[in-house]
Image: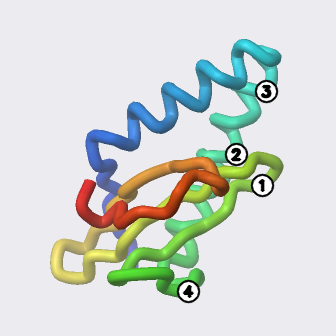
Amino acid sequence: MNYAFVNRPAVNTDVIDAVDYYKKINPKLAEQFLVRIEEAIIYIAEYPKGFQIKYKNVRTLMLKQFPYHIHYIVNEEENEIVILAIIHAYKAPEDYSKR
């Protein structure tokens, strides 16, 4: 089954903040971060239910190379994968399903 991807508005801010951080360290790191997000999205598209539910139907996938998790839900009714957040793994946990 093919799902459409939908990003919650806060996801763009999550990515911009992380890219800005990595650009200050090394611009190539920022580029690599974006590549890892793309790889993770492709993997989620192939195996949307391949990750365990962490809370309230929210699944998480940790990026390769970077300490960030993609928080997402699979909405069967709308045939969508909704990306809720892309956040640092050590950030205080909260309920991203409300974002």
As drawn, 98 above or below 8: below
Query: Real-space Cα distance between discs 1 and 3?
Result: 13 Å
Q: Which residue is mark 3?
A: 29
SS assignment at label 3: helix
Residue closer to the observer: 19 or 94: 94
Q: Which residue is mark 2?
A: 36
Q: Position of residue 84 (x, y in %)?
A: 36, 57
Q: Residues within 10 Å of mark 1 (few under 14, many from 20)?
A: some
Q: Residues within 10 Å of mark 3 (few under 14, many from 20)?
A: some
Closer to viewer: mark 3 or mark 2: 3
Q: Which residue is mark 1?
A: 64
SS assignment at label 4: loop
Query: Real-space Cα distance between discs 4 and 1?
Result: 17 Å
Under mark 3, the amino acid is Leu
Disc with the residue nearer the chain's start (3 vs 2) = 3
Disc with the residue nearer the chain's start (2 vs 4) = 2
Residue 52: mark in rendering: 4
Q: Position of residue 76 (x, y in %)?
A: 26, 82
Q: Residue 89 falls in which quadrant of the image?
A: bottom right
Name which residue lies at 40% across and 32% down: 13
SS assignment at label 1: loop
Labels 1 and 2 touching (C-beta < 8 A): yes
Name which residue lies at 27% across and 40% down: 9
Query: Real-space Cα distance between discs 3 and 4?
Result: 29 Å
Q: Residue 42 falls in which quadrant of the image?
A: bottom right
Query: Real-space Cα distance between discs 2 and 4?
Result: 20 Å
Q: Position of residue 62 (x, y in %)?
A: 67, 62
